[in-house]
């Protein structure tokens, strides 16, 4: 094996010891040596990593599914391959390649779900920063068949948040059963997922109704190409506003990334007959209440979309790399992670946070 990289024995990593505990940044966390890597595993030296709301859920342990502890979170990482496990056949990546780590770290690739391209639901799925250690460390063990190649010239910081936020909204829009020129409603359009959703929707030739609140988010959504803006704090009747914007018919689809159940209930009212409600948010407890009568009468499809498979990840990254989608992010340091979590809890973060791991 090539040894162009000198791999240290220890590294800096952000560790949550038990669910709900504060993040501790340790400088002496062990690095898995290249000799210890199993076939199919690769070791990455990280350039940067995004911070996702899911990381906060994992650290707090407030989901029906529990993360492992002690936990290194993070699942929007970009780094370079510095080692590949011995006896790895047909590796699609080689040492020196720049690749991304997404939420789905690995899957069996042989079960029915994997065969059908629904590898996110593989019963043997490994989840980055949840069931296996994630990207909040300088070196990360990942899997050659699941890392996402990052095209040359595409900045690592720009790519990071595409790997979760971008892939998630890209796939949801891809499967929203919309055609060129259709109307799509994006609640939370000015947020981390939403601002990417507006751009992917425009790339797909859709007309966008952006819902959010505040002048800054209005400006951002309009700059990104939203056709209609609705401020939910100023609107007296969101359903009526959407119908007014769509010749009285309603929208063709809604991609709902928010955590509150009201966003979902409302969608059945503002979708036109044959419309599709795509559920994307992952609130721990909220339930979806929709009128069965109107779901049937209007032939509404209610679908769920969960992150994305390897192909979705490549497509979302390629569109962004070609300039079709741009992530708005602030660059911070790994040591800032605890304060980033506090700001996430308070809903204070505009766009995404990316942590620089190269210092
Ligand atoms: Zn995420
Ligand atoms: Zn599988």
Image (cartoon, rainbow, N blue to C red):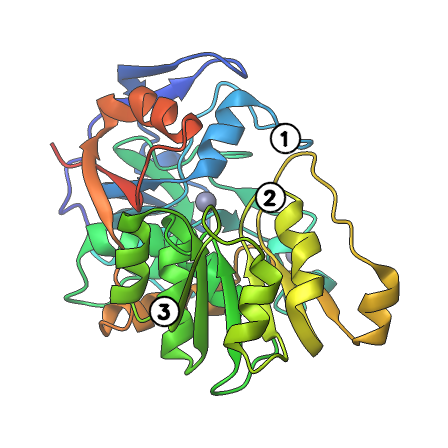
Could you tell me if the residues under marks 2 and 1 are in contact, i.e. CB atoms within 8 Å?
yes
Residue 10 visible to the viewer: no
Q: Is mark 2 within 8 Å of ligand 1?
A: no
Which of disc 2 and disc 3 is earlier in sequence? Answer: 3
Asked if the beta carbon under badge 3 is closer than 8 A to the nearest atom of ligand 1, the reply is no
Q: Is residue 302 left or right of residue 149?
A: right
Identify which residue, 253 or 71, lies in the foreground.
253
**Residue indicated by mark 1:** 63
Q: Position of residue 10 (x, y in %)?
A: 25, 22
Q: Quadrant of ligand 1?
A: top left
Say which element carries label 3.
loop
Q: What number is the disc on residue 226?
A: 3
Q: Secondary structure at mark 2?
A: loop
| Figure check: 30 above or below 99 | above
- From the top left corner, tell me how far across and down residue 153 is, in percent: 14, 66
Q: Which residue: 52% across, 15% down?
A: 20
Direction bottom: furthest residue: 180
Expressed as whole percent of the image width and height from the top left, the position of residue 166 reads 40, 58
Residue named by callout 2: 282
Of residues 215 and 162, the one nearer the viewer is 215
Name the one closer to the observer, 165 or 13. Answer: 165
Q: Quadrant of residue 145 in the image?
A: bottom left
Asked if residue 286 shows in the view, the reply is yes
Q: Name which residue lies at 65% across and 34% down.
A: 284
């Amino acid at each position: 094996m090539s040894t162009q990289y000198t791999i240290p024995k220890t590294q800096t990593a952000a560790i949550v010891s038990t669910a709900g505990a504060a993040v501790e940044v340790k400088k002496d966390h062990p690095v898995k040596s290249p000799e210890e890597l199993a076939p199919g595993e690769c070791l990455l030296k990280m350039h940067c990593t995004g911070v996702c709301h899911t990381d906060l859920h994992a650290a707090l342990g407030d989901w029906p599914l529990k993360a492992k502890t002690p936990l290194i979170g993070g699942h929007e990482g970009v780094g370079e391959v510095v080692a590949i496990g011995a006896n790895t056949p047909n590796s699609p990546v080689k040492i020196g390649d720049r690749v991304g780590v997404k939420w789905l770290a690995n899957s069996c690739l042989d079960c029915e779900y994997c065969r059908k391209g629904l590898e996110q639901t593989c019963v043997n799925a490994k989840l980055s920063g949840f069931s296996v250690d994630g990207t909040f460390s300088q070196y990360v063990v990942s899997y050659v068949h699941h890392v996402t190649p990052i095209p040359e010239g595409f900045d690592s910081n720009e790519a990071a948040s595409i790997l979760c936020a971008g892939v998630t909204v890209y796939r949801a829009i891809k499967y929203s059963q919309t055609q060129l020129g259709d109307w799509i409603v994006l609640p939370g359009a000015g947020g981390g997922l939403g601002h990417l959703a507006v751009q992917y929707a425009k790339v797909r030739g859709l007309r966008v109704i952006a819902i959010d609140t505040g002048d800054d988010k209005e400006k951002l959504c309009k700059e990104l190409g939203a056709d209609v803006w609705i401020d939910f704090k100023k609107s007296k009747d969101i359903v009526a506003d959407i119908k007014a914007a769509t010749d009285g018919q309603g929208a063709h689809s809604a991609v709902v990334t928010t955590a509150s159940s009201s966003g979902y209930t409302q969608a059945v009212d503002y979708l036109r007959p044959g419309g599709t409600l795509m559920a994307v948010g992952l609130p721990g407890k909220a339930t979806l209440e929709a009128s069965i009568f109107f779901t049937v009468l209007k032939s509404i499809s209610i679908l769920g979309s969960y992150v994305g498979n390897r192909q979705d990840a490549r497509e979302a990254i390629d569109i962004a790399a070609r300039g079709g989608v741009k992530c708005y992010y602030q660059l911070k340091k790994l040591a800032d992670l605890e304060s980033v979590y506090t700001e996430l809890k308070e809903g204070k973060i505009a766009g995404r946070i990316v942590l620089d791991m190269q210092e």
